[in-house]
């Protein structure tokens, strides 16, 4: 079966750095997405990786290793507004998105 | 105004009632999706449509039906609502020429008593 694993919850301190991991087993691979979702709101796109390596976008970076079925989202200089759930999703060989359950990130002052 | 609009935003109904959730978009995207989200679970795909004449079942289509009335409109119906359909429902769109990035509506919270 297809599976996306990510930690259920993480806690970090304002101003610090946090890494949220995602491992996947899917039928084929056509890209990996990270979305941010604040409580009660819609998910919003953060990043897309299809090739191995690091993609940097401001305070957020996303890394992919296709051979290991592994990605991480790195958040730097954490702000209180970064408190949210972070969703990992993989597009399989049929171009269907498989979603992880999300990681709830709690930022403490 | 939001690019992807869902109505209603909140609905409480009773078991056995028929419910329709509507979605409209101004992004000009050809692809539209309906997802449900439950606590502790990932987003689950109910139905998707790649154009007006194309409707496909997703992972959890039982108990649901859809209608693609126009490129910009995609409605989800629950013919006879049951309590385990209580969830947060999201409509989303994407552009077939892009990476597959989804643009979500604000969500419709449905409670079935």
Image (cartoon, rainbow, N blue to C red):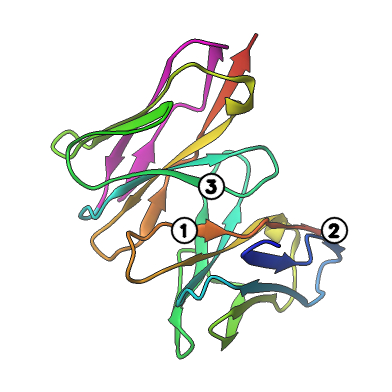
Stretch in magenta: A1-26
Q: Nearer the viewer, mark 3 or mark 2?
A: 3
Q: Main secondary structure of the magenta part?
A: strand
Number of numbered labels in the structure image: 3
The picture places residue B6, in percent across and down from the top left corner, at: 70, 66
Q: Residues within 10 Å of mark 1 (few under 14, many from 20)?
A: many
Of the image marks 2 and 1, the number of the one nearer the N terminus: 1
Q: Residues within 10 Å of mark 2 (few under 14, many from 20)?
A: some
Disc 3 to disc 2, C-alpha distance = 30 Å
Report the residue that reaches farthest toward the front. Answer: A58
The picture places residue B25, in percent across and down from the top left corner, at: 60, 72
Cβ–Cβ below 8 Å for labels 2 and 1? no
Q: Residue at x 50, y 76 (%)?
A: B28
Residue receiving disc 3: A44
Residue receiving disc 1: B102
Q: What subunit carries mark 3?
A: A
Same-chain status of marks 3 and 2: no
* Residue A74 included in the magenta stretch of the image: no
Q: Is residue A54 above or below residue B89?
A: above
Residue B113 circle label: 2
Give the structural element (helix, strand or loop) at label 2.
loop
Q: Is residue B91 left or right of residue B52?
A: right
Q: Is residue A44 left or right of residue A91?
A: right
Disc 3 to disc 1, C-alpha distance = 8 Å
Q: Quadrant of residue B26?
A: bottom right
Q: Looking at the figure, which quarter contains the C terminus of chain A?
A: top right
Cβ–Cβ below 8 Å for labels 3 and 1? no
């Amino acid at each position: 079966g297809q599976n996306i694993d990510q930690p259920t919850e993480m806690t970090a301190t304002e101003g610090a750095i946090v890494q949220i991991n995602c491992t996947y087993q899917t039928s084929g691979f056509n890209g990996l997405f990270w979305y941010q979702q604040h409580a009660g709101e819609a998910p919003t796109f953060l990043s897309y990786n299809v090739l191995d390596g690091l993609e940097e976008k401001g305070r957020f970076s996303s890394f992919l290793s296709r051979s290991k079925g592994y990605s991480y989202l790195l958040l730097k200089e954490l702000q209180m507004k970064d408190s949210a759930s972070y969703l990992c999703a993989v597009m399989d060989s049929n171009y269907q998105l498989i979603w992880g359950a999300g990681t709830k990130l709690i930022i403490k002052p | 105004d939001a690019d992807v609009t869902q109505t209603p935003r909140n609905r409480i109904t009773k078991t056995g009632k028929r419910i329709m959730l509507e979605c409209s978009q101004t992004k000009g995207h050809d692809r539209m999706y309906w997802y449900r989200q439950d606590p502790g679970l990932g987003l689950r795909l109910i139905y998707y449509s790649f154009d007006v004449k194309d409707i496909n079942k997703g992972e959890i289509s039982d108990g649901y039906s859809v209608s693609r009335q126009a490129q910009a409109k995609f409605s989800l119906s629950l013919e006879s609502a049951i309590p385990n359909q209580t969830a947060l429902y999201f409509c989303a769109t994407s552009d077939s020429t892009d990476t597959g990035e989804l643009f979500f509506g604000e969500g419709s919270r449905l409670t079935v008593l």
